[in-house]
Image (cartoon, helix red, strand yellow):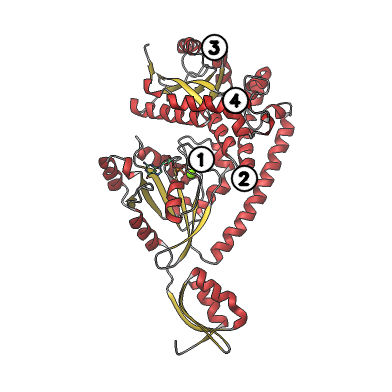
Amino acid sequence: MQNFTPLDHIETGELDLEERQALRRVAGLSTELQDVTEVEYRQLRLERVVLVGVWTSGTAEDAENSLLELKLLAETAGSEVLEGLIQRRPKADPATYIGAGKALELRDIVEASGADTVIADGELTPAQLRELEEVVKVKVVDRTMLILDIFAQHAKSREGKAQVELAQLQYLMPRLRGWGGNLSRQVGGRSSNGVGVGGRGPGETKIELDRRRIRERMAKLRRQIAGMSTAREVTRHRRKSREVPAVAIAGYTNAGKSSLLNRITGAGVLVEDALFATLDPTVRRSRTADGRLFTIADTVGFVRHLPHQLVEAFRSTLEEVADADLILHVVDGSHPDPEGQLAAVREVFGTIEGALDVPELVVINKADAADQEVLDRIARRERDSVVVSAHTGAGIPELLELLESRLPRLDHEVRLLVPYDRGDLISRAHEEGEVVSVEHVEDGTILHAWVLSSLYSELERVAKPVERV
Ligand SMILES: Nc1nc2c(ncn2[C@@H]2O[C@H](COP(=O)(O)OP(=O)(O)OP(=O)(O)O)[C@@H](O)[C@H]2O)c(=O)[nH]1
Ligand SMILES: [Mg+2]
């Protein structure tokens, strides 16, 4: 087939399929179907998809990587990928995304493979979606919709859910007119109660809402999100004012950010070989070898062409990164294109105010599975980097050492008599600083410790210097 490059290694594994069918059978026996969560319900719907991409620039390898990532995204959303096709052309066809002739070929492939959905590797205009759908005769979903869908499946917290819904509505708004009479089929999926890929969240029940009501809903969500991020800001401010240094783990999705957090803190954070396993930032407290307290936060993963609606909606979460004292930028050294991942993440950093000013330490992860040559190549390019494996623990001591050397130091030594009614200051010295000794005497506690400047100035105000200790 001229111009169309099938990717034969894109087939979904047999085991995967078996697992899914097993899941389907067991769940189907249950009489409590209405009780299963939306995510579980979603897994009952096995979707068979064909992927299609337009390759306009870059190498053939880039194009393949992009489609392989789309395959992972599709599988993360619960689909079974039947085939992947790429068309080389100077730019996407304004009418049908791929060329008209290729659209017909695609229709034949869809028919022959029994696919029920086509996923296009880009953001399509409403008209392109509609026209391609008319040719191929099955639902067409684009990359943006797919990512929004995954986020909708994974959002757990109230804030995360609100952020995703806002992003979905933003995506939907300009498409309301374009889809016209097709709207309910488009948004609601293919069956009457369908929540297929791209159909979750603002689906059926909201279709009847007119634009004005959607706008109202969006305004309400924005207010809610603003309220929730205020609460977070208060927490963050409190953390800041106590001068506990903050480390943020950021990076491409599936790079191993949560695994690294677990390795460093022993926190039981969900690790999954899935994209966007983490949507709600987890903050943990940890200590350096010399006892200094710091916080370390896991964050939502980034992906190439992260829908701008999502960047917007998740801004408050991403600001966590801009506020940190240090960013651990995790990259998967075993990925075919780690440099591309680093660049994609930095592009998102560029859109968050202040994020580029935060010192960044590149953590090249999955050393156990990566090519030594590739590891060396990245390490040469990224001068401020360390090679680790969250799995085996290799390189973690070096990482911690680097991390410690980058955190604000406890550079004030105090020997003070703290009055008994200020026991809180003693607790803080234990929490934030390094206590050498405490001794209880008649009129207070004699504290000998190393502390940060904030606590130092407060101690200076209320405590009396002592000679001995
Ligand atoms: N071989 C190998 N695999 C790893 C390593 N670290 C993480 N992984 C695997 O990579 C996958 C993703 O790990 P996570 O820690 O969930 O990655 P994440 O960056 O938090 O991913 P998202 O939250 O989805 O963005 C899992 O299957 C991990 O087991 C490593 O050092 N070596
Ligand atoms: Mg994670």
Give percent across and percent down for residue 187: 64, 24
Residue labelled with disc 2: 157
130 left or right of 13 in image: right
Q: Which mark is residue 277?
A: 1
The nearer-to-camera label among 2 and 3 is 2
Left or right of 35 on screen, residue 84: left
Q: Residues within 10 Å of mark 1 (few under 14, many from 20)?
A: many
Return the residue at label 3: 135
> Quick check: marks 2 and 3 in contact, CB under 8 Å?
no
- For ligand 1, give the image quadrant: top left
Q: Quadrant location of residue 130?
A: top right
Looking at the image, tell me whether mark 2 or mark 3 is earlier in sequence order.
3
Which residue is identified by label 4? 196
Could one spot residue 231 in this view of the protein?
yes
Disc 3 vs disc 1: Cβ atoms closer than 8 Å? Answer: no
Q: On the rendered image, what quadrant is the N terminus found in?
A: top left
Determine the CA span between mark 1 and mark 2: 13 Å
| Relative depth, front residue between 282 and 142 | 282
Question: Which kind of residue does numbered mark 1 sit on?
Answer: Ala
